[in-house]
Image: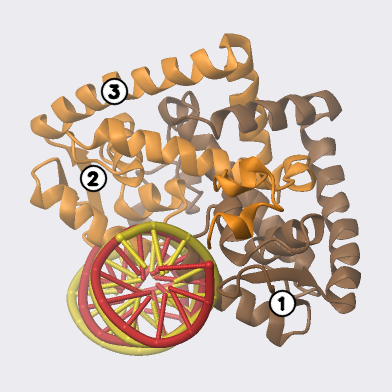
Chain colours: A orange, B brown, C yellow, D red
Amino acid sequence: MTASKRTAKSQAEARDAPAAPLDMSPLAKIVGYPLRRAQLAVFEDFNRRFVALRLTPAQFSALALIGANPGRKQSDVAGALGIQRPNFVAMVDELERRGLAERLRTPADRRSRALALTAAGAALLERAWRAQAEQEKAIERLVGRESRALLIAALARLADLQ
Amino acid sequence: MTASKRTAKSQAEARDAPAAPLDMSPLAKIVGYPLRRAQLAVFEDFNRRFVALRLTPAQFSALALIGANPGRKQSDVAGALGIQRPNFVAMVDELERRGLAERLRTPADRRSRALALTAAGAALLERAWRAQAEQEKAIERLVGRESRALLIAALARLADLQ
DNA sequence: TATTGTTATACTCTATAACTATA
DNA sequence: TATAGTTATAGAGTATAACAATA
């Protein structure tokens, strides 16, 4: 496009100024849309913080839950995390391969596998909780201390939607 | 297992009572975990409410955004929704196939396609907003009116986490 | 040269059926 | 018969490279 062809347009348009932002107000007024965007942003932030620990949000939640509930069987941990049993197999495989968790045979029921952290797993989890505390601080800086507490409470209730 | 073998166990265990729930308290205290669980619950609730309209959350957000911003080009709508341009193609294809949206050629720039709702799309979007209002009511019943407003504000801020 | 829409493709997540070993 | 772990597999959703048309 030549300069002469742009004379009818405003200077801003001629300079290829960014187009006006879209009107997001209808979506911004419902819970679901900002809820999804916030979840993606928080997980992306998590991934940045945890890249050195090589832990995804799902892996962190699994380590944390096993750490707080050692000896519980694999399917119970999967169920508590909302992960389908078949999908949890590869995840525990990976934690075991990295020497972070172990599957123990229990004499009471030889079908099941009791999960527990190894010493290395417990050590990594400690580092992970410190990284997580940093994210919570960043969130608190963004929304305020009181808001963060209210947010957690409201989200926990929302999770009960059926 | 025979009855005699269970005599050493408590009556509750003998009856195969559900195992004690896991301790979720560490995960319940951070934002990310309940945020993810809430997002999944809200989307599942959305899917139940929208099955008759055959709209996914992503499709609803696209219809809503096109409806509020008719004539904007496809890549701008995709960008505003956080959807990669290539992935938005099939989505618009489907909306167009169902006669809900259309891609218009614009004389100003023949590379781009301006999106707009058809009459059928606008009509479906109206029904969709009524269904969405029902979800907002359900959420308000769950967390309270004030909490819902605070929640939306806090989530919008969280979405700005870098 | 850069941008828009598009195609192709790969990777992750998730859901389901079915197998095995145990109970 | 039922349950725990597992395998296999299919379907979403998402990210990236590269192309044609147009600027």
Mark 1 and mark 3 on one chain: no
Instruction: Report the side of B88 relative to C9 (left or right).
Output: right
To which residue does mark 2 refer? A115
Q: Is residue B131 visible to us here?
A: yes
Residue drawn at the location 91% of the way across and 71% of the way down: B123
> Disc 3 on helix, strand or loop?
helix
Does A117 sit above or below residue D9?
Answer: above
User: Label 3: few (<14), some or many (≥20) within 10 Å?
Assistant: some
Residue drawn at the location 8% of the way across and 43% of the way down: A99
Quadrant containing the C terminus of chain B is: top left
Q: Which mark is residue B104?
A: 1
Residue A60 in the image: state x and y as whole percent. Answer: 30, 38
Mark 2 vs mark 1, CA separation in Å? 57 Å
Callout in the foreground (1, 3): 1
User: Label 2: few (<14), some or many (≥20) within 10 Å?
Assistant: many
* Mark earlier in primary sequence (3, 2): 2
Q: Amino acid at mark 2?
A: Leu
Mark 2 and mark 1 on one chain: no
**The quadrant where residue B114 appears:** bottom right
Does C1 sit above or below residue C9?
Answer: above
Residue A10 in the image: state x and y as whole percent. Answer: 69, 45
Q: Chain of mark 1?
A: B
